[in-house]
Image (tube, grey):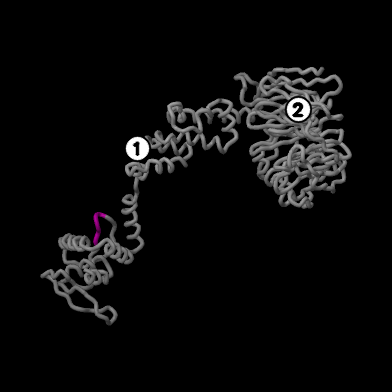
C-alpha cells in the first residue's frame, strides 16, 4: 500500500492519479511505458488517446477542478470506486497524509470549494453534545458569559439550549453579575428588595428561572426611567430645616443609607435619620464652625474654624481625640487606609498616620501654596491640593514630595475631586476645569455658573456642581471628556431650590443631597418620582424642621 501511495502521489493531477491507479490495478485495456518530461523517467499512460487531448472533469456537480486523460465518461465511475476502495484500506494517518498531498496540488479555487464543503461538516452543536456526555455544568458555564440579548437568542436555538439556560438559572446569574459590577444595579436590588433572591444556592425558596427572565426587562425599564429623570430634572424633593438660634448655614455633610451627618456654622455636628429625617444626635465640642467632616463605620473626623481636628466615636458621639496643629481654620480633610490629610487657611497641608482613632501622629507638613489651601484629596499615588493662589499642586503620597502644579484657573480654587487620572476643580472664576493629573493638561473648561463654584463631585457618568449662585448643575462627564462635544450639550440640567449659597453636596445614582447657607439640607430623589413629577419649576417637597434647644 505504501508503494502504491507513492506512485499515486507522484502524479500531478487528479486525472493522472486515477490513471495511475488503473494501470497499477492491471486493467487489461491499458498498457504503459516510461516517459519523462525533463529527461527523467515517469509513468505516462499510453492508450488510444493523443497525449495532447485533455478532458475537464467535475466532481459531484461542483466546479471544474482539473483535467484528466481518460477514454470515456463511463470509466470515471470505475476509477473513482477503485480510489475509494484503496483509500479505505489505509490507516487514518496514511489517509490524512494522502489528502494533504492531494490538496497541496490543487489551485486556490479548488481550495475554496473544498473549504465550503468541509465547513458545515466541522460544525458541532457543543451545547447539546456536552449534556449528553454528563457535562451540563460546562455548557452552563459557556452560556453564562452571554449578555441579555445573546441569552434571549440562545433560548430560541432549540429546546435543549432552552433547557440548559433554564436549569442553569442563567438569567439569575446574569443579574447577579450586573449587581456585583454596577452600583446602579446594586442600589436598585436593595431599594426594590429583589436582592433577597440573589446569591443563594438552589433551594425551594428561590424562584424559577422564568422569574429572573421577566425581572430583567423590568430592571432595564427602571434604569431607563432613572436616566430620563436625571436628564429632565424630574425629582422628588425633601427638605430638612436646620435652624439654630445664633447662626445659619450647613457647611458640610456626608450620608449613607441610614443617616446624614452634617457640620454647621453654629459649631455643632448633627446626625439625621435618613428615612424619617429626624435629628438623632447633636455633637458639641468645637468652638468654631464645623467646616469639613468625613466618617466611616467607626469614627467621625471633623475640622473647624477653631483650628482643631476632632475624632468622634460614631455610635456614642464621644470625643476620642483632638489634634492641635494648624494655626488657622481647618478647611478640609480626607482619610483612608490609615492615612489622613488636612489643609488649612494657614497655607499648609498636614499628612497624618492614623494607627487608631486615639493614635494619630503627624508624618509630614507640605508647604508650597501662597494662599489658604481650601481642599485636598488623595489616593495611593498622589495627594492633590487646591488653593486661593489659583493653583492645584500634586504631591507623592508615599514620599510627600512635590510632583507638579496645574495652572489655568484665573482666580482662587474652592473645590476639587480626584480619582484615577482625572481631577475636576471649581473656582471663584465661576468655571469648572477637568485635568489629566499625569501630564497636567486641562481637558475641558465648563462654564455656566454665575458665581463661585463652591462644591463639586463626579462619578463615571456625571459631574454635579454647586455654587454661590444657589444653583446645582448636572453635567455629562463623558461628553465633557470628548473634545468634539459642543459646549452647549454638556450641562444636562440646572436645579434651583436653595435660597442661599450651596456649600456642599454629595450624590449617587439615585439622589443628590446638598446643604446651603440657607440652613437647609435638600434631598433630590430621582428614583421615587411621582407620575406627575415636574421637570421645571419648583418641586413638590416635604419639609422637616429641627429647632435647637
Picture disc at residue 317: 2
Q: Is residue 539 left or right of residue 246?
A: left
Closer-to-camera residue (66/1): 1
Picture coordinates of residue 75 (x, y %)? 16, 63
Name which residue lies at 84% across and 48% down.
367
**Residue 475 x/y as whole percent:** 69, 35
Residue shown at 36% from the left, 45% from the top: 126
Residue 203, by quadrant, is: top left
* Residue of label 1: 160
Query: Along the horizontal axis of the image, is 184 left or right of 251?
Result: left
Which label is found at residue 252? none
Q: Is residue 46 left or right of residue 283?
A: left
Indicate the quadrant containing the N terminus: top left, top right, bottom left or bottom right.
bottom left
Q: Is residue 490 visible?
A: no
Residue 16, placed above or below residue 338: below
Using a 10 Å C-alpha cutoff, classify the residue at mark 2 as few (fewer than 14 neighbours), some (14 to 19) or many (20 or more).
Answer: some
Find numbered disc 1 in the image and state the secondary structure of the residue it sits on: helix
- Specify start and end residues of the magenta stretch as a single range: 57-61
Q: CA distance from mark 2 to mark 1?
A: 61 Å
Residue lying at the far right of the rendered structure: 327
Residue 497 location in percent, x, y? 74, 24
Amino acid at each position: 500500500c505504501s508503494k502504491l501511495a507513492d506512485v499515486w502521489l507522484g502524479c500531478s493531477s487528479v486525472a493522472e492519479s486515477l490513471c495511475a491507479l488503473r494501470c497499477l490495478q492491471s486493467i487489461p485495456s491499458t498498457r504503459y511505458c516510461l516517459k519523462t518530461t525533463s529527461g527523467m523517467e515517469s509513468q505516462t499512460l499510453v492508450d488510444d488517446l493523443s497525449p495532447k487531448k485533455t478532458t475537464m472533469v467535475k466532481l459531484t456537480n461542483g466546479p471544474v477542478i482539473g483535467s484528466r486523460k481518460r477514454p470515456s465518461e463511463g470509466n470515471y465511475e470505475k476509477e473513482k470506486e477503485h480510489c475509494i476502495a484503496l483509500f479505505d484500506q489505509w490507516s487514518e494517518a496514511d489517509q490524512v497524509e494522502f489528502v494533504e498531498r492531494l490538496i497541496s496540488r490543487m489551485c486556490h479555487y479548488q481550495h475554496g470549494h473544498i473549504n465550503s464543503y468541509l465547513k458545515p461538516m466541522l460544525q458541532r452543536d457543543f451545547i447539546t453534545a456536552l449534556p449528553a456526555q454528563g457535562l451540563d455544568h460546562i455548557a452552563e458555564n459557556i452560556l453564562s458569559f452571554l449578555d441579555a440579548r445573546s441569552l434571549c437568542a440562545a433560548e430560541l436555538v432549540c429546546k435543549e439550549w432552552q433547557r440548559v439556560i433554564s436549569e442553569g438559572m442563567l438569567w439569575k446569574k446574569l443579574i447577579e453579575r450586573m449587581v456585583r459590577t454596577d452600583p446602579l444595579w446594586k442600589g436598585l436590588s436593595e431599594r426594590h428588595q429583589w436582592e433577597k433572591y440573589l446569591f443563594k444556592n438552589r433551594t425551594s425558596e428561590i424562584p424559577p428561572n422564568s422569574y429572573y427572565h421577566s425581572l430583567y426587562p423590568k430592571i432595564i425599564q427602571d434604569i431607563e426611567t432613572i436616566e430620563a429623570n436625571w436628564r429632565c430634572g424630574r425629582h422628588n424633593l425633601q427638605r430638612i430645616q436646620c435652624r439654630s438660634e445664633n447662626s445659619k448655614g450647613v457647611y458640610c455633610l456626608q450620608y449613607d443609607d441610614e443617616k446624614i451627618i452634617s457640620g454647621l456654622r453654629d459649631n455643632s455636628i448633627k446626625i439625621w435619620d435618613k428615612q424619617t429625617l429626624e435629628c438623632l444626635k447633636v455633637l458639641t465640642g468645637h468652638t468654631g464652625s464645623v467646616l469639613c467632616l468625613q466618617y466611616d463605620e467607626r469614627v467621625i473626623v471633623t475640622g473647624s474654624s477653631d483650628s482643631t481636628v476632632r475624632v468622634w466615636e460614631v455610635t456614642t458621639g464621644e470625643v476620642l481625640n483632638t489634634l492641635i496643629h494648624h494655626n488657622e481654620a481647618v478647611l478640609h480633610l480626607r482619610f483612608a487606609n490609615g492615612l489622613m490629610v488636612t489643609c488649612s487657611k494657614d497655607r499648609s497641608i498636614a499628612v497624618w498616620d492614623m494607627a487608631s482613632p486615639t493614635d494619630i501622629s503627624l508624618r509630614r507638613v507640605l508647604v508650597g501654596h501662597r494662599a489658604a489651601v481650601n481642599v485636598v484629596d488623595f489616593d495611593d499615588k498622589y495627594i492633590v491640593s487646591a488653593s486661593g493662589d489659583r493653583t492645584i499642586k500634586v504631591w507623592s503620597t508615599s514620599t510627600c514630595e512635590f510632583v507638579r502644579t496645574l495652572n489655568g484657573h484665573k482666580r482662587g480654587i474652592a473645590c476639587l475631586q480626584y480619582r484615577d487620572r482625572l481631577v475636576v476643580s471649581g473656582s471663584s472664576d465661576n468655571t469648572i476645569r477637568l485635568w489629566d493629573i499625569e501630564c497636567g493638561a486641562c481637558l475641558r473648561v465648563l462654564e455656566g455658573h454665575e458665581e463661585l463654584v463652591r462644591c463639586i463631585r463626579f462619578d463615571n457618568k456625571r459631574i454635579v456642581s454647586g455654587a454661590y449662585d444657589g444653583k446645582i448643575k448636572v453635567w455629562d462627564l463623558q461628553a465633557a471628556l470628548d473634545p468634539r462635544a459642543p459646549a452647549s450639550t454638556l450641562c444636562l440640567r440646572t436645579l434651583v431650590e436653595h435660597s442661599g449659597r450651596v456649600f456642599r453636596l454629595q450624590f449617587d445614582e439615585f439622589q443628590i443631597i446638598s446643604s446651603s447657607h440657607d440652613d437647609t439640607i435638600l434631598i433630590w430623589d430621582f428614583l421615587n418620582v411621582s407620575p406627575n413629577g415636574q421637570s421645571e419649576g419648583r418641586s413638590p417637597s416635604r419639609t422637616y424642621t429641627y429647632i435647637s434647644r
